[in-house]
Image: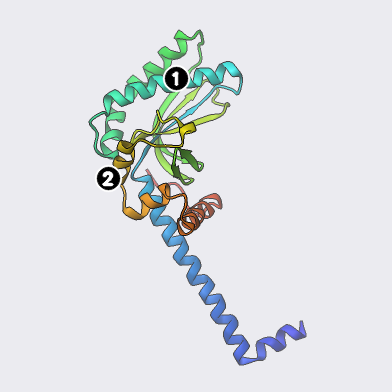
Amino acid sequence: MKKIIKIFKNPKTKMIIILSILLFIYTSMCAFSYAQTVSSDLAESVFRLHVIANSDSKEDQELKYKVRDSLINYMNSLCKDCQTKAESVEIAKEHLSDFQKIAEKTIKENGYNYSVNVSIGNFEFPTKTYGDISLPAGYYDALRVQIGEAKGQNWWCVMFPPLCFIDVTSGVVPDESKEELQENMSEEDYAIISDNDSTEIKFKFKILEFFTDNGFLTAKKQ
């Protein structure tokens, strides 16, 4: 303890410590501000789909995918001419009851009587990769579908721009989908989700994940 006190009594050492603390605070604030801005911009660029299965049983998981496919088919027919996320969200809201009916119909046709809850809101998503595009964890507007008790594994994708039908095993997103992404976000934001080789971009991606995973970036108010 005496050694520590002695160190702080040295004016030069004391100044170095204070400056180091101030530099750390400033850097942290800049990193947080950057993460908050980028997270918000990305969230404003995409509209996602979130389907939750009744349980983790094989049958319930298979049903989840059938409900997903029915909803995506309908969404794609509705939003084939949409140019912005705002348009797709508005159309989805106008047809929310239709999404509900389609999900219920699919469940019934497959021999189940599960209830289903379909809603549009701002929900938390983990980091997800779609081919060669990666979206960092954060809060995104989404169409959420809860099947039965909704205690099974989740399934996520991007409804706008349309990335739901991409074969992630190929590791390639079609150029037309990338073009839509680019048109709806800044050059910086697009680089963060698409450039997996740059060390700088990887570092920025990790900054976003750090602040989200530790609860510093929270859901926007509806």
Q: Which residue is mark 1?
A: 67
Q: Quadrant of residue 81?
A: top left
Q: Nearer the viewer, mark 2 or mark 1?
A: 2
Q: Is residue 102 above or below residue 15?
A: above
Which picture quadrant has residue 133?
top left
User: Residue 159's x, y, as percent?
Assistant: 36, 32
Residue at image x 48%, y 40%?
129
Local secondary structure at mark 1? helix
Q: Residue at x 49, y 69 (%)?
A: 27
Q: Is residue 15 left or right of residue 145?
A: right
Rendered view: 201 above or below 194: below
> Residue placed at 42% from the left, 15% from the top?
104
Left or right placement of residue 179 versus residue 108 in this view: left
Q: Position of residue 108 (x, y in %)?
A: 46, 10
Q: In the picture shown, does residue 190 fall above or below 155?
A: below
Dot 1 amino acid type:
Val
Instruction: Name the kind of residue labelled 2 in the image.
Output: Glu
**Viewer-proximal residue among 159 and 5:** 159
Residue 38 position in % (x across, y down): 39, 54
Q: Residue furthest right?
A: 2
